[in-house]
Amino acid sequence: MSDGAATANGSTNNLDAIKNSELHDSTSSTPRPDQQTLTLLPTLDAAAAYNTVANGPVAQNVKDQSQKTTSELSNLAASRQTPTTRTATGQELTHYHSFFSELLSWNNPRASAIAYASVVSFIFAVRYLDLLRWGFKLTWMVLGITIAAEIAGKALLNNGFATQLRPRKYYTVSRESLDAVIGDVNELINFFVIESQRILFAENIYASAAAAIAAFLSYYLVKIVPYWGLALIATTVVFFAPLIYTTNKELIDAQLKQASDIINDQTSQLRTVAAKHTEQATQVTKQYMGDYTAKAQALIKGSPPAKHAEPKHTELRQPELKTELKSDFFPSPPKEVYPAAPKEELEDAEPPFKAENEPQPLIVS
């Protein structure tokens, strides 16, 4: 009995403690932990969303591509080294040969794509944007703002705003930087000069043939395509022709080898025929020279030159038909004698007509 009463008293005390704690929580001004969590939920959701976007697969892919692009641009810039190969004349090439070779070979595809997009964008900007007028407009607007700010500052504060923004020392270009730029421009100009001469003198037959075909097509396209269109076509061909070749190198090399074999066979055949005709012409020339030499020696010694037996030409003649003319072939003349007309009848006969007023002759015989 005593244990049951103790248990009942303990449960009653616990209920009173719970009620007192709830009453204290309701009257207290300090928020409970669940209320603090509800208050912080919007902030936690925004942070979680930002972390999801910033560290998600899309953001990670963007970071990876950015790092790869930066690395490829660095590799392209580092490729500007003077190559070890030389021209046919033994001259050194410029470092732009290595640079453009690396750029057009698409070994760094992101850098090559950026370069192509930049060139195409520049062509369209020159075509469709009036950059010169925009440059003049930007110039007079900037100068107008600086002049107005300077005048207003001096009028209000006795100190112009442009004067306050003016640097303590004007910017200048150092001699080292200028020499580097001039040397780089010199290398770029020499690149085009050397390549034009190598194409002109057919140092690389394929490059010269490609340049000839391009000039031939441009000669006809310039009549129907504007200059910016030709520039766009040329840029596309220059960038994508090496890419097509590197992608289908085995097939293209096989076709080029087959065409080269056919050309070599035809060339060797023509060389054989030409050698044969040359040998025949040489023999005929030697024969004639020998004959003329013999004749000249005979004339110098005083003896008539030996006559060469000339081939006899046989003439074809028609056979003569010999026929004997006999008297039986012709008819005999008539032997009948006609009687003579009487003279009296001829005198008495009158003329068929009589001339009237016949003029007298002027000269009498």
Image (tube, rainbow, N blue to C red):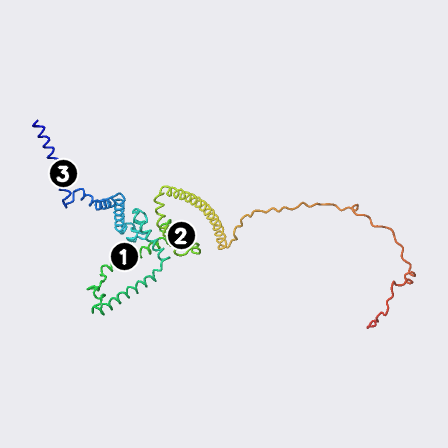
Q: Is residue 156 left or right of residue 103?
A: left
Q: Earlier in the sequence, mark 2 or mark 1?
A: 1
> Pointers 2 and 3 in contact (CB under 8 A)?
no
Eye-nearest disc, 3 or 1: 3
In what element is the residue under mark 2? helix
Identified by mark 3, the residue type is Lys
In the picture, which quadrant includes the C terminus? bottom right
| Foreground residue among 304 and 339 | 339
In the picture, which quadrant includes the N terminus? top left
Give residue 141's position: percent from left, percent from top.
30, 64
Identified by mark 2, the residue type is Ala
The circle on residue 19 is 3
The circle on residue 184 is 1
| Foreground residue among 319 and 29 | 29
Picture quadrant of residue 51:
top left
| Residue linked to disc 2 | 214
